[in-house]
């Protein structure tokens, strides 16, 4: 049974989601403030964290920032105000894996949760052209020149998708489906943000600045070295 941490100060919504997800065979633990949620994330073992942006005493964006700074790489699904692109994009830049606008449909939330959790069920992938990379999807571990990359679930799946087609252009539509488990929609910048974050982490690990190339209008390419 997968354990999910739900961090949301809306008690009625939390109760509804807890009942719905429990019926879908998830174990749910709830926190109602940012501080409480951060403490539980640090001390508990969770397969997924559902994090609301608007929280008392510490907002969700700050909670996410502190989690990632503490090397808590548990996948995070953010709940954002409908149409609030600023919080959504900022959350993705800080390492959120996906987002659902509020008020959310429980069935859509469940679909997003399952898409994130399915990312850990693949087998190890290798490529003869990418000796600097090691991508183990069974352990959700990626290395560059032997150095472990601290990636979020979405960043890992983005790398896996690019790595499996090393030296080839991968469309944004394919990346969105394989990394986020959903179709690309108009004006959706999520995959661009994840690729940007992934590129930064690869550069920090010693890769060239053009390790991932943006082919405008076509997609992204993981460049052979």
Image (cartoon, rainbow, N blue to C red):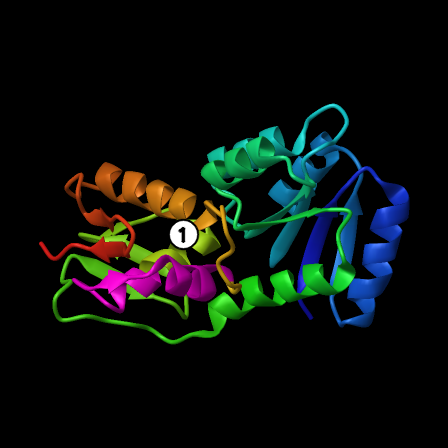
Q: Which residue was labeled with disc 1?
A: 155
Q: 37 or 129: which is nearer to us? A: 129
| Left or right side of 173 for 67 | right
Q: Check the picture and name the quadrant holding the C terminus.
A: bottom left
Q: 148 or 202: which is nearer to us? A: 202
Taking the spot 59% from the left edge, 33% from the top edge, the residue there is: 87
Magenta segment boundaries in residue numbering: 160-180
**Magenta-colored stretch includes residue 172:** yes
Q: Is residue 154 visible?
A: yes
Q: Position of residue 191 (x, y in %)?
A: 42, 50
Badge 1 crowding class, 10 Å Cα cut-off, few under 14, some 14 to 19, many 20 or more, is many
| Left or right side of 216 for 64 | right
Q: Hey, which quadrant is residue 63 in on the image? A: top right
Which residue occupies the extreme bottom position in the image? 123
Q: Position of residue 97 (x, y in %)?
A: 52, 50
Q: 223 or 74: which is nearer to us? A: 223
Q: Secondary structure at mark 1?
A: helix
């Amino acid at each position: 049974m997968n354990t999910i941490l739900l961090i949301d100060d809306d008690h009625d919504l939390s109760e509804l989601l807890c009942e719905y997800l429990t019926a879908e065979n998830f174990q749910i633990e709830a926190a109602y403030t940012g501080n409480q949620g951060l403490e539980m994330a640090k001390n508990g073992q969770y397969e997924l964290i559902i994090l609301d942006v608007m929280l008392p005493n510490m907002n969700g964006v700050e909670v996410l920032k502190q989690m990632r700074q503490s090397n808590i790489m548990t996948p995070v699904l953010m709940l954002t105000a409908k149409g609030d692109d600023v919080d959504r994009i900022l959350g993705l830049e800080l390492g959120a894996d996906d987002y659902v606008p509020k008020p959310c449909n429980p069935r859509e939330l469940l679909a997003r949760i399952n898409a994130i959790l399915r990312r850990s069920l693949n087998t190890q992938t290798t490529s003869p052209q990418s000796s600097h990379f090691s991508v183990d999807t069974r352990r959700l571990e990626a290395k560059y020149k032997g150095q472990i990359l601290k990636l979020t679930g979405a960043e890992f799946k983005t790398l896996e998708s690019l790595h499996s087609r090393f030296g080839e252009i991968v469309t944004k539509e394919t990346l969105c489906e394989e990394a986020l488990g959903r179709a690309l929609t108009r004006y959706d910048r999520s995959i661009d943000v994840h690729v940007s974050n992934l590129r930064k982490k690869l550069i920090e690990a010693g890769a060239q600045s053009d390790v991932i190339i943006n082919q405008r209008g076509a997609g992204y390419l993981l460049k052979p070295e």
